[in-house]
Amino acid sequence: MSVQSGLTYNVTTLTVAGSATCGGGGQAGVTVVDGSLEQMFRGGVGGPIAVRLDGPVMVDCDGAAHAWQGHLVAPGRALPNDSGGMLTVTLSQGETVLATTGSQPIHIVT
């Protein structure tokens, strides 16, 4: 399970991507369980902005590595175009967590 450190800025969303591998058949869901960006502005840093995926992201569990991609949103908040933070991504089937990235540094690329 991996996540790329660069997030592509798209005004209302940030594109996040990585790769995941799982076996056993079926599909597994990619979930951002803990993600936040620091709000950057001229002259300082603001408070954290919580981010999450805007919808389901699934990968096949066939033993091969699969690229995944999703869009991060910050409900009720404007997304900064120059920021960084931390993100934890998990791969799960039902209630079972198959893999996690652990907390990883991220940053926005324009």
Image (cartoon, rainbow, N blue to C red):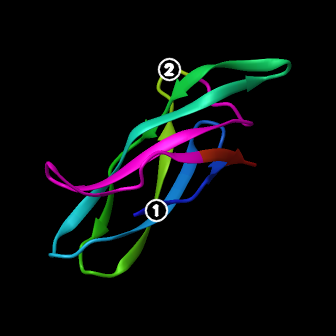
The residue segment tinted magenta is: 78-105
Residue 67 among those drawn in magenta: no
The percent position of residue 20, horizontal first and vertical second, equals: 38, 68
Q: In the rendering, at what x and y percent does residue 41 appear? A: 78, 22
* Residue 66: x %, y % from top left: 39, 74
For label 2, the SS is loop
Q: In this view, does 8 lie to the left or right of 58?
A: right
Location of residue 77 with respect to 110 vertically, above or below = above
Is residue 55 rendered to the left or right of residue 73?
left
**Residue depth check, mark 1 versus mark 2: number of the one nearer the observer:** 1
The circle drawn on residue 91 is none
Is residue 42 something one can see in this rendering? yes
Residue type for callout 2? Gly
Residue tagged 1: 2
- Quadrant of the image for the N terminus? bottom left
Q: In this view, does 12 lie above or below 14?
A: above
Where is residue 62 shown, x and y percent of the image? Answer: 24, 80
**Predominant secondary structure, magenta span:** strand
Q: In this view, does 107 lie to the left or right of 17?
A: right
Residue 23 drawn above or below residue 80? below
Q: Which residue is denoted by mark 2 in the rendering?
A: 76
Q: State the residue at coordinates (61%, 25%).
A: 78
